[in-house]
Image (cartoon, rainbow, N blue to C red):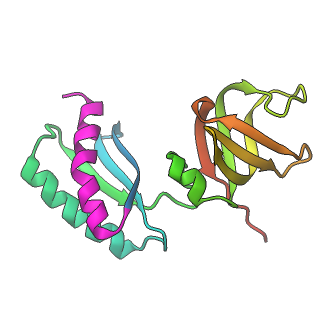
Amino acid sequence: MNDASVVDQVKELALPVLRDLGFELVDLEFKREGQGWVLRFFIDKPQGLTLDDCAAFSREISLVLDVEDFIHRAYHLEVSSPGLDRPLKSPEDFDRFRGERIKVKTFEKLDPDERNHPRKTFTGELLGLEEGRIRIKQLDKKGGVVAIPLEAVAKANLDPEFEF
């Protein structure tokens, strides 16, 4: 069984458990790190995640994975929150986090505001997803609104700004 099919099977088993606990799956990884394999869940809930939430899901998913017993490698199970720079992956994420500051990296350089300044990184206020394009109000000196095709996005994250 390859690593991608392990992730697919684990995801299929985990989604009902997450739903029952009121959590959402942000990301799931199964990869070799250092001395061994790690199965890592990044989970969240609208009001924020606690350590007790992570522990509760860890207990539940451990039981399910032990019963199913299809991962034929020793691995460590990790459950955590996605962090302040949470990745944005689904179309729903781009609606849910409307008004938040985000950072988007594209696969190739784009010039969405047609100012002859192609680039791969865009930062600003998320205005939402419209017709398959992420709309961002740029907060830098360039200003204006850009619309980046979803299929051009290599990575999108919340980009919190801290004041000291």
Q: Locate residue 56, reporting x and y percent.
A: 27, 70
Residue at 18%, 58% (x, y): give it.
62
Above/below status of 25 relative to 69: below
Above/below status of 120 relative to 29: above
| Quarter of the rendering containing residue 162 | bottom right
Q: Locate residue 42, reporting x and y percent.
A: 41, 55
Q: Locate residue 72, reporting x and y percent.
A: 13, 37
Above/below status of 9 relative to 124: above
Q: In this view, does 13 lie to the left or right of 129?
A: left
Residue at 14%, 56% (x, y): give it.
64
Say which quadrant the N terminus sits in: top left
Q: Does the magenta stretch include residue 5?
A: yes
Residue sitting at the far front:
131
Main SS of residues in magenta: helix
Please tell me how many numbered marks the rendered image carries: 0
Q: Is residue 109 left or right of residue 20?
A: right
| Quarter of the rendering containing residue 21 | bottom left
| Quarter of the rendering containing residue 10 | top left
Q: Does the magenta stretch include residue 70?
A: no
Say which quadrant the C terminus sits in: bottom right
Q: Along the line of sight, which residue is nearer the eye, 31 or 117?
A: 117
Q: Locate residue 112, reporting x and y percent.
A: 79, 32
Above/below status of 97 relative to 141: below
Q: In this view, does 98 lie to the left or right of 81?
A: right
Q: Along the line of sight, which residue is nearer the eye, 130 or 23?
A: 130
Where are the magenta residues, as a range?
Answer: 1-23
Q: Along the line of sight, which residue is nearer the eye, 26 or 40?
A: 26
Residue at 89%, 47% (x, y): give it.
143
